[in-house]
Image (tube, grey):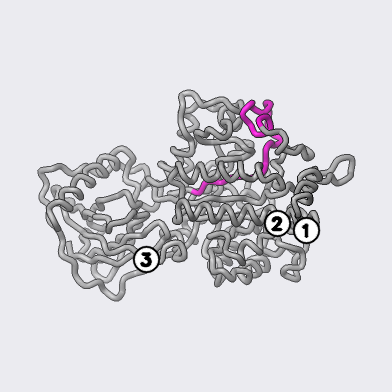
Amino acid sequence: MPIRLFLFSLALVLTASAASAQAGDLSGRRAAAVTAAALPAPTLALREAPLPTIETPVDLPQVDREFRAAWVATVDNIDWPSRRGLPVPQQKAELRAIMDRAVEIGLNAIVFQVRPMADAFYVSELEPWSEYLTGRQGQAPAPMWDPLATAIELAHRRGLELHAWFNPYRASHPTQGAPQHETHISRTRPDLVRQYGRYEWIDPGEPEATDHSMAVIMDVVNRYDIDGVHLDDYFYPYPETANGRRLQFPDAESYARAQEAGETLGRDDWRRQNVDRFIERMYREVKAAKPHVKVGISPFGIWRPGHPASVTGFDQYAEIYADARKWQVEGWLDYMAPQLYWSIGKRGQSFPDLLEWWGEQNAAGRHLWPGLFDSRVLPEIGTYEPREILDQVALVHADEEATGTIHFSMKALMEEHSDLGDRLASGPWARPALVPASPWLDPTPPRAPALGLRQSGETKWLLLTPPGEPVRSWVVREKRGEEWTLHVLPGWRLTHALRADERGRMPEMVSVSAVDRAGNEGEVATVAP
């Protein structure tokens, strides 16, 4: 190893070791790994040695690939924080507990709601602070902190992806307690916002309104180190009624202006076109800014009744003007997460029938990660036994197209509310898994890392040198006799302790590879420490 590279690696190792001492050893697979005593920080007096590589064995075990995520909903304080105006130290403690629990049960991603209703769970010059955070819209937290920045740091320290979840059009919610802040779009640009039943809604037919929502999303993409942009199932609003009659969304004026400008589509097709253009533009702009940031959408689980033939129910295409199948076919997203919120045996909305149908639409070869309704195991909802979710995960594992699941919501996976998370951890999620690769974002895997060794007493430290590009994760495989042990470490880690197993055996061979931000696993370097 060249001396300059060696000294640079040494400096990084010392920095990473100090960070590890503060955050705890986060390389493990369960909560014990999160809360265990920190690894001792090596000192400058220790013996250093670069390691020559040897031939990588052909029986190298492969790491599982599966997206395992949960939604953390902030609207109406569903998941976090537990109540509005919670003191900041408690807000931080609750957020940390969520991230620790995610690691404990085997998740590898969190989908964190940052914009419930044209407000913000982060420092923003475009929209006011959320009422669900501080208790009053526009009121900054005191002492000041940035929940999104903290969530990203907590997630990445634990090897989790963090996807920022936006609602592009909703401008108010029935659970809102106080009036809108003067900086809210309903006050600054009331001409772009429509009152619809119990909600206020940013009109998707107003170009300036969609420009604003796009600016909000791109502001987060450009300023924060997120791993994904995520939209849920709210496009045009779900139908509202008054006095037993359905209300028409009040966009007659914006439609008339569009017609005056030359629009010839009927009103329903025009509405779908408005949403289509937003989705296509969002994908294009996110990729232009940061190609590695994934774009995901979680639409209502039924595209249209009769697709497949066994399915009846709500028609998102005709009712909320969301042509989710088109977005999937056109490849305007990196993952589709249809909300399959029905049981396996449900007539008219069969989970397996819908899972198969969405897989058949995947002409662009993007990820299919269906959403599951875990919250139905909670007593207040109470229509599922935990076995239902476990069986749904098993069906996804057996499906040819689907490679993961997103779970609504994190509350149902927290230990104090349900044992579902523990059942998943001891069952289908017992082995660590990497997020599936997205080679269309970056087709080139990383090179093999350079490896070194440092001895500290009886502990051997493997030194990991990044292969010239950002590392999302490290895959470390240790061989003892005929047995392999697999570790998935967060990319910021630049050391790995080589320890004896329960039989006192030290690793006789170690293979290490880097995983980039598109999920590509690179070349393997194998050493005999």
For marks 3 and 1 on the same chain, the one whose residue lies earlier in the sequence: 1
Q: Return the residue nearer the eye: 253 or 349.
A: 253
Identified by mark 1, the residue type is Leu
Which stretch did the figure color magenta?
A: 163-188
Residue 201: x %, y % from top left: 71, 40
**Residue behind mark 3:** 444
**Residue behind mark 2:** 273
For marks 2 and 3 on the same chain, the one whose residue lies earlier in the sequence: 2
Residue 300: x %, y % from top left: 68, 55
Identified by mark 3, the residue type is Thr
Marks 1/2: CA distance?
9 Å
Residue occupying image coordinates x 45% and y 56%: 291
Residue occupying image coordinates x 56% and y 31%: 129
Residue 478 seen in render: no
Question: Which tag is nearer the camera, tag 2 or tag 3?
Answer: 2
For the residues bearing labels 1 and 2, Cβ distance under 8 angstroms: yes
User: In the visual, does 100 lie left or right of 357?
Assistant: left
